[in-house]
Image (spheres, rainbow, N blue to C red):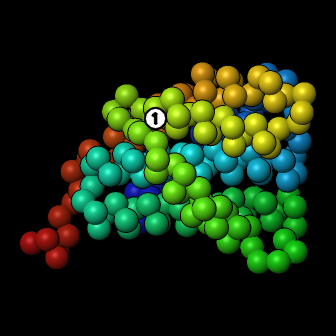
């Protein structure tokens, strides 16, 4: 599960970066620095929640727990490396610890929303839109929720769904413990 989680972590990272690039192309002001990472963090947490919901549909409880834990840790490590490069060391703790704390804090909120094979429900997307809106410059706030809900989140979810289906639906090699 750790290897699969690492692959999905990389995919989630790239998907979030691509969404950020599209937002900047659409003239949203997302400055390189703390705002950039706040935006990315919100998308990454959302996509980890999506990956966890997909894992719930395809894995048993122990596998899901191992997968989601490894995924969250790997995404946090990637984010930590990138933030450290751009922003330097944090005043206290680490970027990884801060991200995991926020992920854990928001997990109970995200747990309230529904996810089906069709994707996340309206409230799931709206919550992400509102979270992202808080990271944006005042001039961009009126339009960002629609951009996230109608364009960025659906594209990101579709990519993660496809990637995880391809990854999790491949028959796993039998381990010595399974024989």
Q: Rate crowding at label 1 as few (under 14), some (14 to 19) or many (20 or more) other CA atoms within 10 Å.
A: some
Q: Is residue 109 above or below residue 92?
A: above
| Residue holding disc 1 | 120
Q: Residue 171 placed where, x, y %?
A: 21, 51
Q: Residue 156 placed where, x, y %?
A: 55, 34
Residue visible at 47% across and 66% down in the picture:
70
Q: Residue 32 placed where, x, y %?
A: 87, 46
Residue visible at 61% across and 49% down in the picture:
44
Q: Is residue 179 above or below residue 60?
A: below
Residue visible at 45% across and 35% down in the picture:
120
Would you say 30 lies left or right of 21 here?
right
Whether residue 13 is visible: no
- Residue pushed farthest left? 179
Q: Residue 74 placed where, x, y %?
A: 56, 63
Whether residue 40 is visible: yes
- Number of disc labels: 1
**Image quarter of residue 43:** top right
Quick one: SS at disc 1?
strand
Would you say 139 lies left or right of 95 here?
right
Quarter of the picture containing the C terminus is: bottom left
Quarter of the picture containing the N terminus is: bottom left
**Image quarter of residue 148:** top right
Would you say 178 lies left or right of 90 here?
left
Residue visible at 46% across and 42% down in the picture:
113
Viewer-closest of 64 and 167: 64
Q: Is residue 120 above or below residue 42?
A: above
């Amino acid at each position: 599960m750790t290897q699969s989680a690492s692959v999905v972590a990389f995919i989630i990272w790239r998907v979030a970066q691509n969404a950020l690039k599209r937002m900047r192309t659409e003239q949203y002001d997302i400055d390189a620095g703390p705002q950039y990472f706040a935006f990315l963090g919100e998308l990454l947490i959302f996509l980890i929640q999506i990956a966890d919901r997909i894992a719930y549909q395809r894995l048993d409880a122990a596998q899901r727990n191992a997968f989601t834990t490894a995924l969250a840790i790997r995404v946090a490590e990637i984010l930590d490396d990138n933030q450290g490069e751009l922003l330097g060391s944090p005043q206290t703790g680490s970027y990884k610890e801060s991200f995991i704390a926020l992920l854990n804090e928001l997990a109970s909120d995200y747990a309230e929303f529904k996810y089906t094979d069709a994707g996340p429900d309206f409230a799931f997307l709206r919550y992400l839109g509102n979270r992202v809106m808080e990271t944006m410059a005042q001039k961009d706030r009126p339009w960002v929720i629609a951009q996230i809900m109608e364009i960025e989140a659906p594209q990101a979810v579709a990519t993660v769904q496809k990637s995880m289906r391809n990854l999790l639906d491949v028959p796993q090699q039998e381990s010595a413990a399974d024989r």
